Image (cartoon, rainbow, N blue to C red):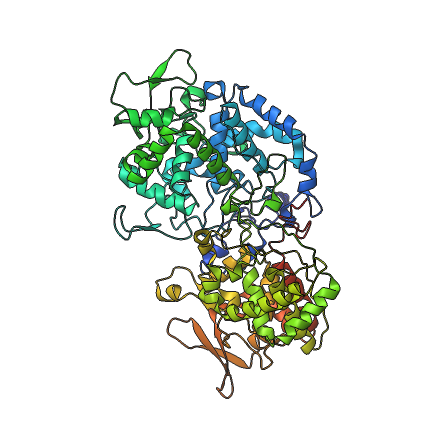
Amino acid sequence: MSEMAADKTDTATFRMEGRCPFGGDRIGGALGDRPALENWYPHRLRVELLHQNGLAADPLGPDFDYAAAFATIDFAALKRDIKQFLTSSVAWWPSDYDNYGPQMIRMAWHAAGTYRIADGRGGAGTGMQRFAPISSWWDNGNTDKSRRLLQPIKHKYGNALSWADLMVLTGNCALEIMGLPTYGFAGGRLDAWEADNATYWGPEVVDMGEVSSFDDMVNRDKRWRGRNGDADYDLENPLAASHQALIYVNPEGPYASGDPLASARDIRITFTRMAMNDEETVALIAGGHAFGKSHGMVPAKEIGPPPEMAPMEAMGLGWHNPRGTGAGRDTMTNGIEGSWTPDPTRWDNAYLENLFRFDWEQTRSPAGALQWKPKDAGAPKTPDAHVPGQMHDLMMMTSDIALKVDPDYRRVCEKFLADFDAFTQAFSKAWYKLTHRDMGPKHRYLGPEAVIEDGLLWQDPLPERDYELVGEAEVAALKRAIAATGLTVSDLAFTAFSAAATYRDSDKRGGANGGRLALAPQKDWAVNRRAVPVVEALRGVMTAFNDGRDDGKRISLADLIVLGGCSAVETAARDAGIDVAVPFTPGRVDTTQELTDIEMFRWLKPVVDGFRNYVDDEFAQITRQVSPEELFLDKANLMTLTAPEWAVLTGGLRALNVNHDGSNRGVFTDRVGVLTNDFFRNLTDTDLVWEKADADGMAFVLKDRASGATRFEATRSDLVFGANAQLRSIADAYAGSDGHGRFVADFVKVWDKVMMLDRFDVKGHRRYGAMAA
């Protein structure tokens, strides 16, 4: 080889050795980069969402006991630390009026204000304001600074104090230092550890690559039907906020129209969807606006991207403001500038007094946002938040003027104007409800300031048990008495599951405890009709048992309903050749109709319940954007089920025929009421083929591939376990020759889990949420 050739070879070798080790000189993506499954197959059922925020994401591990850790905190010292911080301004983000209180009230309010009654999602309970998408919503501008200011306190108390509890407690402390007697505070909120990629926040799609300013995210065009003021004006379920990326409503009015009456309509719809009545709505708005100021010194187009889009060096802080110091006098949040009252750090009635005393005219903030100022030049002024001696006009938002022009809101305002003590109490209680609405029953409440009283209907109160619990001997006798009624395995299992199936982990509501299956409105729901005679028969068993004892032991109807289901599962397993003991934990109590808020419980009524093969008649007749199987997945998530638990529970319920109407849809077995794995075996049998039974693809028949003979009927809630790849892989695990024993054992476990979902009175019954002392 010539010297020149050798040089070329060496150079080529050098170039090859310097190239990317993956075999190319370009890297186009890495784990999670798009396009991904949701881009290629946007209609695929995302079963993996059931495994969000699991133990694998939790650095504290499965054995961490938050209740025990929280109990080690010197609560009085913690509050002193927070209150000292609130009046200690720092240079990098100076406080308005030398008081961080108003800023922290906003942070806590916006953390809690995402709650919605339709599905119980949102709220302050898991500290989701720390994560996308909520962290980067337009309405949460600069809440990232509030949490960063609190970080030294969080580090001081460590894992004994969750971010979720700290944010709400800080809001309470802020109210207290400014003169409001708060109603109470309960700890017990468990932090999430990852972003929420599952909750449906609305149909509006924003291409963040095209967002030029952070207010471009605000959008409302797809969530509403009709126009504001129309008879059919309606907000899509399960949404509550009037706009994408807002907590409640646009403060400038719908479409920034400046129309107070139109704003009042949006306020009523959104606050009602967030479980607030008119009095609570007025109390929260008027009470919250008694403090602090709004910020609008800089046009939104000049503000940098939100935290989730900020550059690496920003370290999780977003909305960079290039004007001046970027903070203090130059702060920008929602674009409206000014304060509502002459003394923005003191609890008083000045907000309502000035709103009604003066006439107001529209004007514009320095950022260009529409707002209102008094027409009377002699109206009181409000001090500048940072320059001593400088005064400004008072400010009102369109959503404030709405309280004055809406007749019903006006009546509430006039009541509060005439009675400041009533206003104080109403705001204190509404704030407590706002910040605790998603926490569930009182057994989850921690700390010396937790208010536990049965008069708060939104807590779904339960009476205290005043009798002794049954033991093993009594349970055995009760099982014999239940068997003597002649109730079938299917009916008993259906009734027990129906009692438990209302539970939703989003706000810890529903479940079998309380025996509300026997009360309005649940007893009247079409999906529960099959349970009515069963409940009456079990009530007879309860009466006979309780009347026949003089030892203080009693059984509640709620316990008896669950026990009937547990006994049915044992019988069904035994008939399938497997002896099992289904756990039963007594202690449920029966509540009363007076302690049941019928209107609030109506929101727990299912539209689709795939477990019982139920589709509401109205859902079946309307134009749908959501399939039954998507709502089935949604329900599995609300019940905290994993994908295997979802599948095995459904397979067992089909074997027992827990269909709401007793039909044979999805009951892929000739041995109904026997706990077999026939559902999975026939679902995955390659000798069988499925065909549509209607034009919409909602009903199906299973036919023998060779003969064409019909074997079974089904719905989408049945076929999804064979059509979806992830669910089918689980079905295979239970359909095989070794699957039956595993199936029965796993079904018993998930049955017990479902029956115990709401038993927060039992210490440690679940890792997530069990807060019993």
Residue that appears at 47% across and 72% down: 715
Left or right of 397 in this view: 112: right
- Residue at the bottom extreme, as displayed: 707
Estimate the x, y position of residue 94 in percent, counting from the top left: 49, 20
Tell me if residue 240 comes above or below residue 176 in the rendering. below
Residue that appears at 51% across and 60% down: 633
Where the C terminus falls, by quadrant? top right
Estimate the x, y position of residue 340 in percent, counting from the top left: 37, 25
Residue toward you, 678 or 687? 678
Is residue 576 among the parts visible in the rendering?
no
Estimate the x, y position of residue 307 in percent, counting from the top left: 49, 35
Q: How many marks?
A: 0
- Residue at the right extreme, as displayed: 473
Tell me if residue 382 comes above or below residue 664 in the rendering. above
Tell me if residue 736 comes above or below residue 303 in the rendering. below
Tell me if residue 462 comes above or below residue 374 in the rendering. below
Is residue 574 among the parts visible in the rendering?
yes
Left or right of 5 in this view: 421: left
Residue toward you, 267 or 593? 593
- On the image, which quarter does residue 194 sit in? top right
Left or right of 476 in this view: 596: left
Residue toward you, 357 or 93? 357
Estimate the x, y position of residue 306 in percent, counting from the top left: 46, 35
